[in-house]
């Protein structure tokens, strides 16, 4: 798999480390309550098909990147910087 | 039709014309007492024990593909009981005991071979960790033996003892660990369940779960609606999709795990051998002679049932580091399976917030060894509405409450760390 890092261009996926679904950026407020935090920490979207997930370009620019890809085909559709926020 | 040596002899002499299909191919009925979603090892085992131990035989196993086409037919078949934390430990101990009687119980050769597993350690710290685990295993009533470097050299002469990268310090031997034949397990359980009256329905995908007022009414399938008061989800890597049909969100992320097999070779690896330095590596030799081996997850969410080259390369590096002789063998095939990774790395067998809906999943990369006990305990839960004593820890609410997390690896309840 090659991930098109917005800063570095097409790079081998081995340069990146994986965190999980991009909804992890939507952190609940500290006082959002147990249910919201439980859902955030443990439950996952886990879609079969197109997903957005967070990869860190550890062996490149070290930026967090949101990658749009397909979990069924492993096709990578696009990538953008995580600091641009959730879609 | 029972199998026996006499029967095999007779069939052999008469052209093997008398064998019958091992299970029927029934059309779905309109109603069942229990509907099991998923005809993998765990679903078939659940049906088998529901019929055998609880007398519940009006049961359907609904499988969207063919039985044995999921992880049960795709795994490296290591069966062991060396888990450590209370909750896991008694469950896998229970499972190993069921394995030991499974061939006779099913009257089916599942080729359960207790050839022993040797886990190699490569540092003082790893030896201490192995000792701690071994003591936990002995306390749970099972066995473990420490092999010194000298003993290990006699037992596994083919390892690279001269390397300086990951020097070998010794090993832990679990004599009762071993392997079994993946699809024979599925077929044997299917036959056993079918003979007791269970309908095994293949090419039947569940597309919806019907509930009314928080109570299960039935399921929608690609072959029509089926009414039932009890629905048991047990679909491994598809857990999130099927649970979503009942409005549930799960602490599960699906990942791909690959396996590899070489051309058939004369017997050379007599045990299951594993080590944990370069990530993780485990190998055994199948009865056909192929070396079957694997490593870690690829490491990203996936439903592809096949992996990518970086992990293939990594696993082969680990193999070469441990046993350079493997470099002479040709790799024939590799494939992947969809793993239901839970956030603490341990499984769930529990009721849900919907009356009559049960959930079994989160087996991660270790559910083959669990097949007998998972079915046994899930059947108990479905039949009696309370957990089996060996599976009381597998609660769904442990993630919410933080109580009773089964954190075998000490990494916390955190996706992506197991
Ligand atoms: C490469 C690899 C190596 C492994 N090695 C080991 C090992 O050495 N030791 C070990 O203990 N474990 C191992 N495992 C893990 C083990 O294989 C799994 O944990 C276990 O098989 C999962 O349970 P199952 O057999 O019921 O799953 P599956 O066989 O995947 O069964 C689930 C079934 O549900 C069906 N299904 C899904 N959705 C629907 C639907 N909507 N309607 C109807 N049916 C549906 C699927 O088609 C599938 O057949 C390994 C797994 C893999 C992939
Ligand atoms: Zn970059």
Image (cartoon, rainbow, N blue to C red):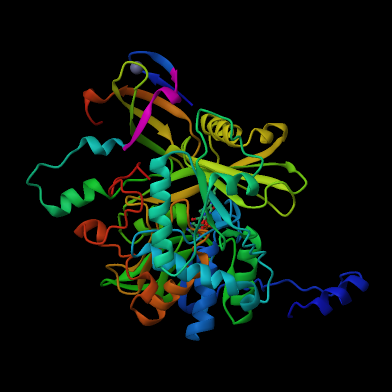
Q: Is residue B189 above or below residue A13?
A: below
Q: Is residue B230 left or right of residue B23?
A: left
Q: Is residue B387 above or below residue B126?
A: below
Task: Look at the image and say whether residue B52 sits in the magenta stretch.
Answer: no
Q: Is residue A35 left or right of residue B309?
A: left
The region drawn magenta spans A11-20
Res B11 seen here: yes
Pick the residue in front: B229 or A53. A53
Pick the residue in front: B193 or B292. B292
Residue sitting farthest toward the bottom: B55
Q: Which residue is rendered at x = 54% and y = 61% of the image?
A: B40
Q: Position of residue B102 (x, y in %)?
A: 60, 73
Where residue B92 sits, quadrant-wise, is: bottom left
Res B60 seen here: no
Count of numbered circles on the image: 0
Q: Main secondary structure of the magenta part?
A: strand
Quarter holding the C terminus of chain B is: top left
Pick the residue in front: B200 or B167. B167
Residue sitting farthest toward the left: A31
Task: Look at the image and say whether residue A19 sits in the magenta stretch.
Answer: yes
Q: Is residue B111 above or below residue B415?
A: below
Q: Position of residue B144 (x, y in %)?
A: 49, 60
Q: Is residue B278 left or right of residue B245?
A: right
Q: Position of residue B239 (x, y in %)?
A: 41, 56
Residue sitting farthest toward the top: A8
Quarter holding the N terminus of chain B is: bottom right
Q: Which residue is rendered at x = 44% and y = 25% of the image?
A: A14
Q: Which residue is rendered at x = 43% and y = 46% of the image?
A: B127
Q: Position of residue B57 (x, y in %)?
A: 53, 82
Q: Which residue is rendered at x = 41% and y = 58% of the image?
A: B242
């Amino acid at each position: 798999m090659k991930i098109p890092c917005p800063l570095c261009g097409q790079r081998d996926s081995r340069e990146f480390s994986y965190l999980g679904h991009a909804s992890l950026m939507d952190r609940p407020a500290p006082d959002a309550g147990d249910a919201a935090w439980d859902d955030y920490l443990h439950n996952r979207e886990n879609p079969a098909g197109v997903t957005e997930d967070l990869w860190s370009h550890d062996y490149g620019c070290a930026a967090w990147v949101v990658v749009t890809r397909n979990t069924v085909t492993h096709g990578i559709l696009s990538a953008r910087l995580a600091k641009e926020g959730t879609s | 039709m029972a199998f026996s040596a006499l029967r095999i002899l007779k069939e052999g002499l008469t052209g093997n014309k008398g064998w019958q299909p091992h299970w029927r191919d029934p059309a779905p009925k309109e109603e069942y007492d229990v509907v099991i979603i998923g005809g993998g090892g765990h679903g078939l085992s659940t049906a088998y024990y529901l019929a055998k131990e609880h007398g519940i035989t009006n049961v359907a196993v609904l499988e969207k593909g063919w039985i044995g086409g999921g992880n049960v037919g795709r795994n490296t078949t290591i069966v062991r009981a060396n888990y450590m934390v209370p909750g896991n430990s008694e469950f896998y101990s229970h499972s190993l005991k069921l394995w030991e009687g499974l061939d006779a119980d099913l009257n089916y050769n599942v080729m359960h071979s207790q050839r022993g597993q040797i886990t190699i350690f490569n540092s003082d710290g790893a030896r201490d960790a192995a000792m701690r685990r071994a003591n936990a295993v002995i306390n749970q009533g099972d066995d473990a033996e420490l092999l010194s470097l000298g003993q290990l050299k006699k037992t596994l002469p083919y390892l690279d003892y001269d390397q300086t990268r990951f020097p070998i310090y010794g090993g832990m031997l679990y004599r009762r660990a071993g392997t079994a034949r993946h699809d024979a397990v599925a077929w044997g359980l299917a036959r056993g369940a079918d003979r007791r009256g269970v309908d095994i329905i293949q090419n039947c995908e569940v597309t919806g779960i019907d509930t009314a007022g928080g109570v299960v009414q039935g399921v929608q399938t690609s072959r029509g609606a089926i009414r039932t008061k009890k629905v048991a989800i047990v679909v491994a890597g598809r857990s999130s999709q099927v649970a979503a049909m009942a409005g549930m969100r799960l602490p599960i992320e699906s990942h791909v795990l690959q396996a590899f097999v070489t051309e058939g070779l004369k017997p050379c690896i007599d045990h299951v051998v594993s080590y944990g330095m370069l990530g993780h590596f485990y190998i055994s030799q199948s009865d056909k002679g192929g070396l079957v081996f694997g490593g870690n997850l690829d490491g990203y969410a996936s439903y592809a049932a096949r992996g990518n080259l970086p992990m293939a390369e990594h696993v082969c590096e680990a193999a070469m580091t441990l046993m350079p002789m493997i470099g002479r063998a040709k790799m024939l095939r590799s494939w992947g399976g969809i793993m239901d990774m839970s956030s603490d790395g341990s499984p769930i067998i529990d009721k849900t917030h919907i009356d009559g809906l049960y959930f079994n999943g989160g087996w991660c990369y270790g559910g083959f060894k669990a097949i007998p006990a998972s079915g046994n305990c899930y059947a108990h839960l479905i039949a009696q509405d309370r957990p089996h004593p060996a599976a009381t820890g597998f609660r769904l609410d442990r993630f919410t409450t933080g109580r009773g997390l089964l954190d075998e690896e000490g990494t916390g309840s955190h996706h992506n760390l197991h």
